[in-house]
Image (tube, helix red, strand yellow):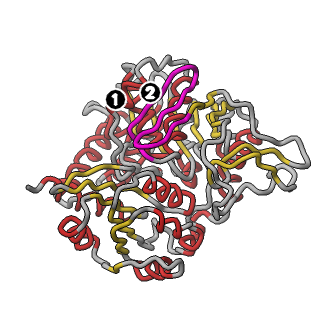
């Protein structure tokens, strides 16, 4: 079996390099598929060599940022970590993370693993290993043609979590859906959240998924919302309510950056977007729950550079470009909020595809609060991608003018040459990698 594992590791490494350098594609999925074909048990064998903790990160939004931040936090404490940094989070991507981290001898030298897993893929991954911790970021409506309604995802996750009864769930306590799931599994759980109202949300037209109690079906009462269904809640008929918060963020400040206090530590980061408070808090709660002091957490944040299109910055011929993934209503609304934090003039490109990985049903665009773009001081808005006409129509319904340019590369060039020097590019899933490659290539050119 070791010989097959060695061959699988070698083949995975070669496949990944060929994909990137010859075909200019992210080769992680192919690397994992080949590794599993050669050695079907490679994931179990390599995961079994992790010396300390295996963390997984699940949830609708924030998985990649939280997972990469958790990995960086562990590494800042001197740990050797296996991580699927690229966000390739299905079975093949998870297998690739371990295979590519292994040495040419077929063995793994790792203290911890920090692995992002797509919710629907947990059922395929968990038979290979049982994690010590699951970070559950949130549960929002996402890709209805793939996941179905949230109840389906919750039932799937409950079944999977219960196959690992010793696994601790580190849950966003402000999300009634995630909290109920963590409680309902019977697994030990630890909650993180924000107990003070940070933003005034009463005029928001966001879709609220947590309006009815998952325990008894009665109406939920919210003292306040942070955004979407996240907030301070309690059932009006039964004893279900927001759990006691173990890692509570307070004294939150937003602006050009963000900061908050947790466990009497002041945490600061140069990121925009209220949702990033949750991402940082989730990573912090995870590392602390594992008994690690996290003494270098703040320094890690100073050095941490969001990549893979999560508020990733590029500088191209005098223009600052921010690339961010926006793939469902809750995520897109938070993207708009992050853009609004920048009060200076800006150009905006919105790229919408409807490939299989995006979800072919794009009706979710009508649940996004796009009329808030009227207050973003936008110099121009360009719609692009396969479903650019649909996006243009959506904006027209809220009286926001836009320019149509189906070719993303041309749209970016137009904004670089004629824009105001401040560009936000918001893309859904399959547009992310290709758009990022365009921006990296342009950034490298003089």
Residue 159 seen from this side:
no
The x, y position of residue 164, in whole percent, is: 65, 36
What residue is disc 2 on?
112
Tell me the distance, in whole angstroms, between the alpha carbons under discs 2 and 1: 14 Å
Give the percent coordinates (x, y) of residue 187: 71, 34
Disc 1 secondary structure class:
loop
Instruction: Kindly give the residue lying farthest to the right in the view shown.
Output: 237
Label 1 sits on residue: 107
Residue depicted at x 70% and y 58%: 209
Instruction: State the residue in front, 146 or 2.
Output: 146
- Which residue is painted at 33% across and 49% down in the image? 312
Q: Residue at x 40, y 43 (%)?
A: 256
| Quadrant occupied by the C terminus | bottom left
- Residue 109 in the image: x percent, y percent? 35, 25
Q: Which residues are magenta?
A: 252-272
Question: Quarter-wise, where is residue 298 in the image?
Answer: top left
Drawn side of residue 300 relative to residue 22, left or right: right
């Amino acid at each position: 079996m070791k010989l097959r594992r060695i061959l699988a590791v070698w083949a995975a490494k070669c496949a990944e390099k060929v994909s990137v350098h010859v075909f200019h594609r992210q080769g992680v999925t192919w690397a994992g598929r080949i590794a599993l074909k050669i050695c079907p048990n490679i994931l179990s064998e390599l995961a079994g060599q992790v010396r300390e903790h295996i963390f997984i990160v699940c949830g609708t939004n924030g998985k990649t940022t939280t997972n990469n931040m958790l990995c960086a936090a562990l590494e800042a404490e001197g740990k050797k970590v296996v991580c699927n940094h690229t966000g390739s989070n299905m079975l093949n991507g998870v297998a690739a993370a371990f295979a590519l981290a292994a040495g040419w001898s077929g063995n793994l030298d790792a203290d911890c693993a920090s692995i992002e897993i797509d919710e629907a893929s947990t059922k395929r991954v968990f038979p290979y290993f049982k994690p010590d911790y699951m970070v559950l970021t949130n549960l929002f409506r996402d890709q209805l043609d793939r996941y179905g309604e949230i109840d389906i995802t919750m039932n799937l996750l409950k079944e999977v979590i219960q196959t690992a009864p010793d696994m601790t769930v580190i849950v966003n306590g402000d999300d009634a859906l995630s909290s109920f799931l963590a409680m309902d599994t019977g697994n030990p759980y630890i909650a993180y959240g924000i107990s003070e109202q940070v933003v005034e949300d009463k005029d928001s037209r966001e879709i609220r998924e947590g309006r009815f109690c998952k325990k008894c079906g009665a109406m939920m009462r919210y003292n306040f919302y942070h955004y979407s269904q996240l907030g301070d809640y309690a059932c009006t008929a039964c004893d279900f309510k927001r759990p006691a918060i173990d890692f509570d963020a307070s004294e939150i400040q937003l602006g050009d950056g963000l900061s908050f206090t947790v466990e009497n530590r002041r945490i600061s980061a140069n990121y925009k977007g209220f949702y990033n408070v949750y991402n940082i808090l989730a990573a912090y709660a995870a590392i602390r729950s594992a008994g690690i002091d996290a003494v270098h957490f703040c320094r890690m944040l100073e050095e941490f550079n969001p990549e893979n299109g999560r508020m990733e910055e590029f500088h191209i011929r005098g223009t600052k470009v921010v690339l961010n993934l926006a793939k469902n209503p809750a995520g897109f609304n938070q993207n708009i909020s992050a853009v609004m934090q920048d009060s200076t003039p800006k150009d905006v490109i919105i790229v919408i595809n409807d490939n299989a990985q995006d979800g072919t049903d794009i009706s979710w665009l009508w649940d996004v609060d796009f009329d808030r773009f009227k207050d973003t001081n936008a110099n121009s808005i360009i719609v692009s991608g396969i479903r650019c006409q649909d996006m243009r129509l959506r904006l027209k319904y809220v009286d926001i003018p836009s320019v149509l340019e189906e070719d993303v590369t041309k749209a970016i060039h137009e904004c670089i040459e004629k824009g105001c020097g401040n560009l936000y590019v918001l893309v859904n899933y399959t547009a992310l990698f290709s758009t990022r490659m365009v921006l990296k290539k342009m950034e490298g050119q003089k």
